Image (tube, helix red, strand yellow):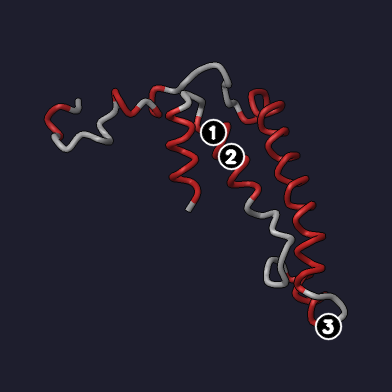
Amino acid sequence: MFIDIIAVLAITLKLNPYLLLVPMTLSTSLAFMFPVATPPNAIAFSFNRITVKDMALAGIMMNVIGFLFVAGYVWVLGPALLKIDKDVFPDWANLNNSCVLSSVNDLCA
């Protein structure tokens, strides 16, 4: 759901979309807040010793720390390891010069 929003945001800010999309996508696996987020959460919750509120309070900090770690990793090590160039806005992301928005296929060559 957020990929479309973040992609348009990156294009509007003239950032390489990978700089925002990769951390967001990797951070989706850091769901620690609720019992249904991961199997270990469900097992811990099934013993009825913790509440959803307890899990949410502990999980929100883990989610924030995890997101900051992943985003920092991509921004610092992304150019070297993932071949993401921070300073270059890729041609494929430039919608003004792209045929993605064009309804006339004859104009796209």
Q: In the rendered structure, find residue 18 and report the number of the disc placed on it.
A: 1
Looking at the rendered structure, the kind of residue marked 1 is: Tyr
Residue under the image location 48 percent in, 32 percent down: 10
- For label 2, count other residues whose C-alpha is less than 10 Å away and answer few (under 14), some (14-19) or many (20+): some
Q: Is residue 96 above or below residue 62?
A: above
Q: Is residue 85 left or right of residue 93?
A: right
Q: Quadrant of the C terminus?
A: top left
Task: Identify the mark nearer the N-term, 1 or 3.
Answer: 1
Q: Looking at the image, do the residues carrying marks 2 and 3 touch, with CB atoms under 8 Å apart?
A: no
Q: Which residue is mark 2?
A: 22
Q: Looking at the image, do the residues carrying marks 2 and 1 touch, with CB atoms under 8 Å apart?
A: yes
Nearer mark to the viewer, of 2 and 3: 3
Q: Position of residue 18 (x, y in %)?
A: 54, 33
Q: Is residue 31 above or below residue 82?
A: below
Q: Which residue is mark 3?
A: 48
Residue under the image location 59 percent in, 26 percent down: 83
Looking at the rendered structure, the kind of residue marked 2 is: Val
Q: Position of residue 29 (x, y in %)?
A: 66, 55
Q: Secondary structure at mark 1?
A: helix
Task: Identify the mark nearer the N-term, 2 or 3.
Answer: 2
Question: What is the C-alpha distance between the residues marked 1 and 3?
Answer: 41 Å
Q: Position of residue 39 (x, y in %)?
A: 73, 71
Q: In the rendered structure, find residue 64 and report the number of the disc placed on it.
A: none
Quarter location, residue 20: top right
Which of 105/21 is in front? Answer: 21
Q: Secondary structure at mark 3?
A: loop
Looking at the rendered structure, the kind of residue marked 3 is: Asn
